[in-house]
Image: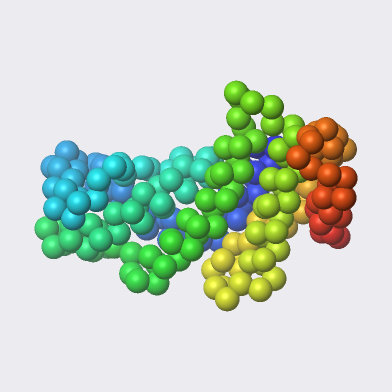
Amino acid sequence: MKREMTLVNRDGLDIIKPVIDKIGNGVRYLLNSKTMCKAFKKIVVELQLHGRMQVLDTKPRWNSTWLMLSTAYFYKDAWPRYVEENVAFTHYLPNAIDWERIYDICQFLEVFFDVTEIISGSYYPTVNLFLAELYRVKVLLDKHSQGSTKPHLQMLATEMKLKYDKYWTQNNILISIGAALDPRYDNLFIKLFIVTLNSCQ
């Protein structure tokens, strides 16, 4: 399931590539020199934004893109301050609309990040969790692809929903069995999950 989630997210993220590239190039620029890193860290300390490090994304791993964007958003007040010290960084500075999109995208992708973490757990059984987590993703994609007030989220969700529907339209019986064996779910709840998951067609 983790592989399918990766494919769903990776292809969907191509739609917002300009924003991702701007942030990625800005982070790459900052990490390119110890002097620039030191100057940026000084600003971070002045603004009292502690606890995170800038992260670069790795192309095949969508979750690294989410980490990069969420970390950049955490430091969004430091980016314009750094431009005051290094005018060349202006080229990488997201505008207000970009920051709003980054925030929305981070909130949206956080659900996928959480789901991937839950179903990839190695210290607890996960087969009973798949159905509920698939349902959670389906509800999110349906909500944003059918009626989002934000066009960038609607485009992203619509693209991701196409992939999601391709992989999960024919519900895997093993996923249902895992949920059926979990005493937290009653049969009516499982039927609702399955009907909702199979409503893609």
Looking at the rendered image, the quarter that the C terminus falls into is: bottom right
Instruction: Report how many numbered discs are placed on residues in the image.
Output: 0
Q: Is residue 64 above or below residue 163?
A: above
Give the color scheme: rainbow, by chain, secondary structure or one colour: rainbow
Residue 76's x, y, as percent?
30, 59
Which residue lies at the image location 52% right of the left edge and 51% below the top edge? 110
Position of residue 92 measured from the top left corner of the image (x, y, whole percent): 30, 59
Q: Nearer the viewer, residue 49 or 144?
A: 49
Q: Is residue 50 left or right of residue 124?
A: left
Q: Answer yes or no: is residue 106 visible.
A: yes
Res. 88 visible in picture: no
Where residue 28 sits: x, y (%)? 31, 46
Query: Which residue corresponds to the image point at 55% horizontal and 61% vertical from the top-left?
Result: 15
Tell me the residue at 14%/53% (across/down): 46
Q: Nearer the viewer, residue 51 or 105?
A: 51
Whether residue 1 is situated above or below residue 89 in the rendered picture = above
- Counting from the top left corner in percent of width and height, residue 192 is at 84, 54
**Residue 89 placement: quadrant:** bottom left
Is 38 positioned to the left or the right of 65 in the image? left
Which residue occupies 36% across, 42% down? Answer: 55
The residue closer to the viewer here, 170 or 25, is 170
Please determine whether, in this image, residue 112 is positioned above or below residue 124: below
- Dividing the picture into quadrants, the one containing residue 54 is top left
Q: Is residue 72 above or below residue 145?
A: above
